[in-house]
Amino acid sequence: MYDLLKGKKGIIFGALNDRSIAWKVAQRAHAEGARLVLTNTPVSLRLGQLQALAEECSAKIVAADATSMDDLNALVEQSLEHFGGKIDFVLHSIGMSPNVRKSIPYEDINYAFMQKTIDISALSFHKMMNVLYNKDAMACGGSIVALTYIAGERAFPGYSDMADAKAMLESVARGFGLKFGRKCGVRVNTVSQSPTLTTAGEGIAGMSDMYRYADKFSPLGNASAEDCADYVVTLFSDLTRKVTMQNLYHDGGFSATGLTEEVLEAFSRGL
Ligand code: NAI
């Protein structure tokens, strides 16, 4: 460990269980010396295992539905009070699509569900930053990170309206990055992560094949949740102070690959 986050204070959204990417980020941030507030929906707190993580990381838990401005206002106020000062970093690790959950095909999408997908998976990022900005809650040079997937930029089967939500999430990072940078050097970035076997990940149709394909298509292989936590911690640290408004690929090289020999061989064997 490097004490990269020594003395820093952060809010982590979206740890549900020990497979969640946010769970790994919380563990890694704690190991690097950060103090944490962990948050998730009241239902997730009941069903998940957040209490165990909070004990491990000596963290405070605050329940909040990230689509509710009231909940977000209360969360930020309680966090400021708990920390006795401003917030250095925030992780948005939230995604949910009722259309994906119910396996509704993209071409026949349910629009009420789609609004929910967008609200939970993208607008929540805007709402969260709206509250942080208007309460002047971020410390100078702070860092805000949201997790995304390459389906926000390129078409992938099975990702359905989550792709639309991710495209919006990445755009919101740029929009708020422009504002936050001038406020006090606060960075806003998205990390585009490899397919990862988590509760949300496994909800995507064909995930296990997609996971294996991406692994063969990436020169470094898929990045795990633990690898993602390592990367996110560098973005929270002072070592990346001039990186903002970027969609940063953390995918073992998948996004820059045209074809790999392994995929070509597998394809020719299959024919
Ligand atoms: P996860 O299922 O462990 O985490 C998703 C979290 O979103 C859960 O903790 C859930 O309670 C929370 N959530 C849902 N609705 C919410 C709401 N209204 N308010 C607050 N929280 C809410 O799965 P995972 O994979 O760790 O997902 C984290 C992030 O990583 C998501 O944004 C996901 O899209 C992204 N991601 C995941 C990949 C994967 O293959 N698993 C790949 C690339 C990005």
Image (cartoon, rainbow, N blue to C red):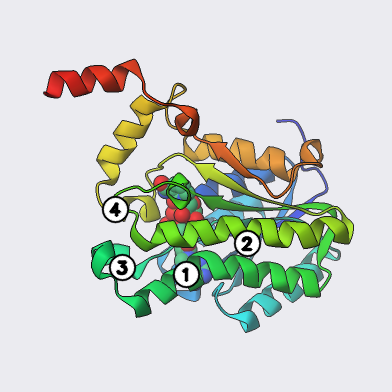
Q: CA distance from mark 4 to mark 1?
A: 16 Å
The answer to whether residue 207 is left or right of residue 234 is left
Type of the residue with mark 4 = Gly
Mark carried by residue 99: 3
Mark carried by residue 172: 2
Q: CA distance from mark 3 to mark 2?
A: 22 Å
Pointer 4 with pointer 1, Cβ within 8 A? no
SS of the residue at dot 4? loop
Type of the residue with mark 3 = Asn
| Residue depicted at x 47% and y 36% | 224
The answer to whether residue 147 is left or right of residue 82 is left
Pointer 3 with pointer 2, Cβ within 8 A? no
Q: Is residue 78 above or below residue 199?
A: below
- Residue 242, image x, y percentages: 81, 41
Pointer 3 with pointer 1, Cβ within 8 A? no
| Residue depicted at x 31% and y 32% | 213
Q: Which residue is mark 4?
A: 158
Pointer 2 with pointer 1, Cβ within 8 A? no
**Outermost residue toward the bottom in this view:** 70
Dot 3 surroundings within 10 Å: few (below 14), some, or many (20 or more)? many
Q: Which residue is mark 1?
A: 118
Specify whether residue 171 is in view.
Answer: yes
| Between discs 3 and 1, the one toward the N terminus | 3
Q: CA distance from mark 2 to mark 1?
A: 12 Å
Q: Is residue 266 above or below residue 10?
A: above
| Between discs 3 and 4, the one toward the N terminus | 3
